[in-house]
Amino acid sequence: MKTQIDHLAAATPSIQDINSLAFVQINDPASPRYAIDRDPDGQDTLYGTLTRNLAEEERAMRAGLAPGQVRRGLRLLKGVLASMDEFCRLLGKELYLIEPLFYHSAVLYERGGCGYVMGRDQMDEIHRGFAQDGPLTRRLDGSTPFRQPGFETTARGRSWAITDGILGFPFGGVKMYKACGRSADVCSFPGGVYY
């Protein structure tokens, strides 16, 4: 005889049954390119997540790019999420998963209606750390180009400081979801601006 738990287990999709949106990069091919994806010896940096090309990252940052960007973006993420919503609906799926590689990506996904499966506590802790006189804000001491005073006020500035190691560990462990046609209405950076 089946119990309620058996019915619930049968109705709950396994992780393999959930679609994922991975590594979204929507670049302007006509904009200047920054080689943050290659170290000075030409080896793959995995967009600065494995190793870094500091000179190219600084050039990209000064040009207004965020960590992981090799070119200026086209600001089409909300359209991509809407298309993914429709694609998943066509497949009969109610949600899909996203794994942001960078802090600023998580903030942009939040603004696109995504919520957290894992990592919301980490995002809230980062926000508290970048509060006025918070421990992360105090580390924005100008010791590197990526740790400038004032970076606490923008998602992009925070993300550069995080990529530069200000947390003491790499950004990661954040998993998000998007429910098709619905917004999770979460915000880990209230009142925050991107640039």
Image: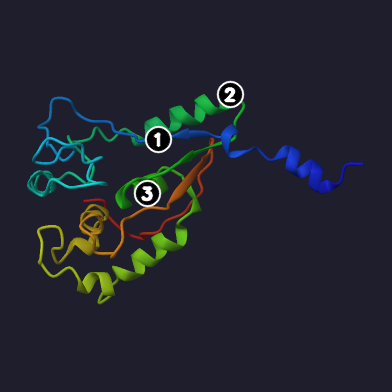
Is 43 on the left or on the right of 90, as rendered?
A: left
Q: N-terminal of the two: label 1 or label 3?
A: 1
Q: Residue 145 in the image: x percent, y percent?
A: 9, 58
Amino acid on which disc 1 is placed: Ala
* Residue 106 numbered mark, or none: 3
Q: Real-space Cα distance between discs 2 and 3?
A: 25 Å
Is 12 on the left or on the right of 77, as rendered?
A: right
Residue named by callout 1: 22
- Foreground: 154 or 162? 162
**In the picture shown, does residue 145 fall above or below 39?**
below
Crowding at label 3, few (<14), some or many (≥20) Cα neighbours within 10 Å? many
Name the element at disc 1: loop
Crowding at label 2, few (<14), some or many (≥20) Cα neighbours within 10 Å? few
Residue named by callout 2: 91
Name the element at disc 3: helix
**In the picture shown, does residue 106 fall above or below 192?**
above
Q: Nearer the viewer, mark 1 or mark 3?
A: 1
Residue reaching furthest to the bottom = 133
Q: Given contact means CB atoms under 8 Å apart, are the residues at marks 2 and 3 in contact?
A: no
Q: Residue 86 in the image: x percent, y percent?
A: 51, 26
Kindly identify the residue that appears in the image at 44 percent across and 27 percent down. Answer: 83
Q: Residue 25 in the image: x percent, y percent?
A: 29, 33
Q: Real-space Cα distance between discs 1 and 3?
A: 13 Å
Amino acid on which disc 3 is placed: Ala
Kindly identify the residue that appears in the image at 59 percent across and 35 percent down. Answer: 94
Q: Nearer the viewer, mark 1 or mark 2?
A: 1
Q: Residue 27 in the image: x percent, y percent?
A: 23, 30
**In the picture shown, does residue 71 fall above or below 133?**
above
- Foreground: 154 or 167? 167
Residue reaching furthest to the right = 1
